[in-house]
Image (cartoon, rainbow, N blue to C red):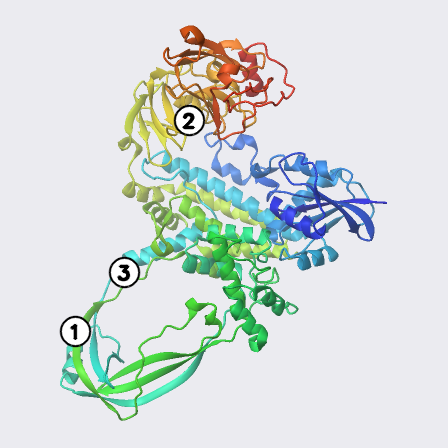
Amino acid sequence: MVVNVLQVAEKPALAKSLAAILSNGSCSYGNTRTAGLPLLEYDGVFKGQKAHFKFTSVRGHVMEVQFPAKYNNWDRTDPGDLFTVDVEMQEADSSKNVVHALRSEAKGCDFLVLWLDCDPEGENICFEVIDAVRPAMNHRPGQQIFRAKFSAITAKDIKHAMQHLGEPDKNVSLSVDARRELDLRMGVAFTRFQSRFFQGKYGDLDSQVLSFGPCQTPTLALCVQRHDLIQTFQPETYWTLDVRALINDSPVKLQWDRVRVFDKTVASLFLHRIQDVRAAKVLRVQSKEKAKPRPTALNTVELLRICSAGLGIGPQQAMVVAERLYIQGYISYPRTETTAYPANFDTAAVLHELKGSPDWGKEARVLLDGALVKPKGGVDKGDHPPITPARLATDNELSGDMWRVYDLVCRHYIATLSPDCRYSVTNVSLAVGSEMFSLSGQRLISPGFTSVLYWMSPESSTVVPDMQEGQECIIKNVSISEKQTAPPGYLTESDLISLMEKHGIGTDASIPKHINTICERNYVTVQGGRTLVPTNLGVVVVHGYQRIDHDLCLPTMRAAVEKQFSLIACGQAEYEDVLFYFIDTYKRKFKFFEQNIQLMDELFEVNFTLLSKTGKNLCRCGKCNRYLKLIIAKPQRLYCPTCDDTYSLPQRGKIMLYKELKCPLDGFELVMCSTGSNGKAFPLCPYCYNNPPFESMPKGSGCNACVNALCKHSAINLGVAPCVSCDGGILVMDPVSKPKWRLACNQCNTIVTLIENAHDIRVTKNVCECGASQLSVDFHKDKSPLKSGETKYEGCIFCDELLSSLVSLKHGSTTHPMHRRGRRKGGRGRGRGRGRGRGRRKPKDKMAQLDQFFI
């Protein structure tokens, strides 16, 4: 009897790598049924039985915690209610149709093996997959669901994991569920409330959303705290004595043992004591050998710190690159807090893999020849082993940031097994009159691990000449210097990562995301040296929280939450009890914040400009017939000073008045949104864009998605056919594209370029038998492709041989689902193909054709 085994990885690329290893390269691609996920198949043995294996994947989380659809409208929902309404699990936007795909592959399967990433998030995805596939699997006695634990994509690790399968941990998954639900409730509630309050009042905030996050906000507060120290810093003047001497014919500068004084009179007194001294006497010469210890094994936080400080790669990008290296089998799992190698870890085996490198192979061979030392003791957090190389690569295989991060991982690994760096430090004490001075320097004895981590080599300071006690040195110059104390610098990404780790803000995997978020929200900007400088908005937001409720931006608050979540993961606390406690806590904090928002608003009034005093007149309001003001700062929007109403606009594209035309439904003047000469343009009604008049018209739609037959700009009148690239989109005539006529999809970025030599093009009421609306083309008389000097022509751009040869497509596939004919011989068309229809019923007219896709 042959059993069927379904295996699921976290990412498509990972599924391909794992299947290739487990099948010894004999896997074959099966039919990918839905969602574009890979399906690899092979035969083998499972638990002593002949088995047929199917290997597929998800794309991260299959499900996400969301509020019911009726609570997604910001205008109709009280943010405070979001702490008590029931939430529901919905299929994640990034994983559409994944549940259906998993169930399809699970039909007839006897066993499920989960190859999700071995971290809390991966454990949570395990149970999302289980919930999706269990109903479709065969029911058998005994264990049917298994969990694979692995840390590197190598044949040894993967086959070992397959031979030692375990079970997914429900408690760890519940801790993630609790975190996701709490973060959703408090994040959305605070974000909606403060965004509506402040964006509806001020016009120059320059941020699309004023977000709040339980980890994001304390992260921002750390940056603002350093900013406040810099702004409030009061420099102090101090004075030092500068003595320059000649030692063995070498000029040197002596360091004053008192370092500095803050009183000029006192400094002058010390200067007076020694200004007539002509020689400095050596009192003591001490030399001592020191060691710079080799680094501990590499974990995620240290990788992110070094990438930012040493390579200039931001944390978010560094994590993306490390993930790619892991999936391709070059390094071990990059999300770990552990800095100690396992007791049974074969350190020499990895060195053998690296010894052929032209970059650090020499150092690896030296260690293998007898210089290998025991790694420095680190901390075992009980999650994954430290980040190590998994196989050798060259700069020909990898390039750019991938090579730089891989090179860092390899060098750091070799360094952890290398001897300490040894150097000597020499200190000389000298007397200049009654004042004591010193001279110090250091000399490298043995580079040790710094031969591979060359940037960590001890810096050479002043070279101390050979000196003897009692020796006298000639004084060349004595002077006094006036200086001032300097403020600390802004936090670098590396500094911030260290502080986040210290205070328990986020996890090793989420730290990059939180830093990236405060940059995207325009709360901080990344400047030279990857320093994080808070913007005016970021400073005001944090100061506002501190005025109302200081706990909202304290890192200790999140640390307390994470501690309780860890108890859920260990089985020492109940999921429902912990979640209820924190939801209730933050609900009360939100109510207090809502009641005292004026304290925060007082800061905004000082730093930002009211909506009524910003923007420029653009188009007329359909309610009061007065001008709406265009607010260009993020988020881009229209504001009516008379009605005190705000209307959202597309955030990408230039907004301009459209011929002073009005919407026939509400009387608002239309505006045009254009994404440039190579993009698309479409008119929109500000009111309909925010308040769709038809159920089939999504919020945030322009006239190119409107089904009003009375409006000449609607998709009903300008729509030609379903989009060639996406499901549900309509190709609509761009009304301002003349003379470069084009159709643009009202959902995706597909553009069909039409006839160049046309004086005019119109969408007709006539419908081709393929279902597309025909176009009426008026060619320039001197460039007409028609015979006998004719200029007018009507036809379908997909089926008509003449017109189809004059169109081209960008940003999409070139096969339209309605094609019935092949391209004519010698035709130049790029917008056609030989595909057949998808079995849609032929509509009798254009209205019915478009209704198929709107309703």
Q: Is residue 351 above or below residue 53?
A: below
- 81 left or right of 837 in image: left
Of badges 1 and 2, the one in the foreground is 2
| Residue occupying the point 24% across, 75% down | 260
- 200 left or right of 167 in image: left
Distance from Cα at disc 2 to Cα at disc 3: 51 Å
Tag 3 residue: 233
Dot 1 alpha-carbon crowd within 10 angstroms: few under 14, some 14 to 19, many 20 or more: some
- Of residues 440 and 696, the one nearer the viewer is 440
Kind of residue sitting beneath label 3: Phe
Q: Give the percent coordinates (x, y) of residue 768.
A: 55, 12
In the rendered image, is residue 704 in sight? yes
Tag 2 residue: 680
Kind of residue sitting beneath label 2: Lys
Q: Give the percent coordinates (x, y) of residue 49.
A: 83, 50
Question: Which of the image's four quarters has the C terminus?
Answer: top right
| Residue occupying the point 21% across, 82% down | 245
- Of residues 521 and 751, the one nearer the viewer is 751
Kind of residue sitting beneath label 1: Lys
Question: Considering the numbered disc 2 on the image, is that residue within a helix, a strand or a loop?
Answer: loop
Distance from Cα at disc 1 to Cα at disc 2: 69 Å
Q: Is residue 22 above or below residue 99?
A: below
Tag 1 residue: 264
- Of residues 347 and 210, the one nearer the viewer is 347
Could you tell me if the residues under marks 2 and 3 are in contact, i.e. CB atoms within 8 Å?
Answer: no
Question: Which of the image's four quarters has the N terminus?
Answer: top right
